Image: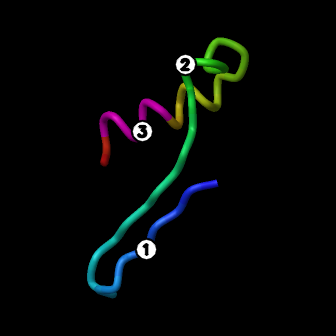
Amino acid sequence: MEAFESIDDSQRILGVQWHPELTHHVNRNEQQLFDYFVHEL
């Protein structure tokens, strides 16, 4: 597991270690989460 955090409370940070290329074809929710990261963040 890997994680990080900000020392500045005014910054929004999200850290994940995830490999959607391995499971996106099996679980539609994973593809939706990946799409969100690409298009919204």
Considering the numbered disc 3 on the image, is that residue within a helix, a strand or a loop? helix
Q: Is residue 11 above or below residue 38?
A: below
Q: Is residue 22 above or below residue 7?
A: above
Q: Quadrant of residue 18?
A: top right
- What whole-number distance in Å separates the C-alpha atoms at marks 3 and 2? 15 Å
Question: What scheme was used to colour the molecule?
Answer: rainbow
Residue found 64% across the figure and 31% down from its top:
29
Which dot marks residue 5? 1
Indicate left or right for 21 with 1 as reference.
left
x, y percent for residue 25: 64, 12
Query: At x 65% / y 23%, what residue is drawn?
Result: 28
Q: Nearer the viewer, residue 1 or 36?
A: 1
Around disc 2, counting alpha carbons within 10 Å, would you say few (fewer than 14), some (14 to 19), or many (20 or more)?
few
Of the image marks 3 and 2, the number of the one nearer the N terminus: 2
Q: Quadrant of the N terminus?
A: bottom right
Q: Write down the residue under mark 3.
A: 36
Task: Name the foreground residue: 40 vs 24.
Answer: 24
Residue 19's spot in the image, x, y percent? 57, 30
- Residue under the point 34% across and 85% down: 7
Marker count (numbered): 3
Residue numbers of the magenta segment: 34-39
Q: Position of residue 10 (x, y in %)?
A: 27, 84
In terms of secondary structure, where does tag 1 sit? loop
Looking at the rendered structure, the kind of residue marked 3 is: Tyr
Mark 3 or mark 1, which is nearer the start of the sequence? 1
The magenta stretch spans residue 38: yes
Residue under label 2? 21
Q: CA distance from mark 1 to mark 3?
A: 21 Å
- Determine the CA span between mark 1 and mark 2: 25 Å
**Which residue is situated farthest in the top direction here?**
25
Judged by its main secondary structure, the magenta piece is: helix
Give the left or right position of residue 40, taking residue 1 as reference.
left
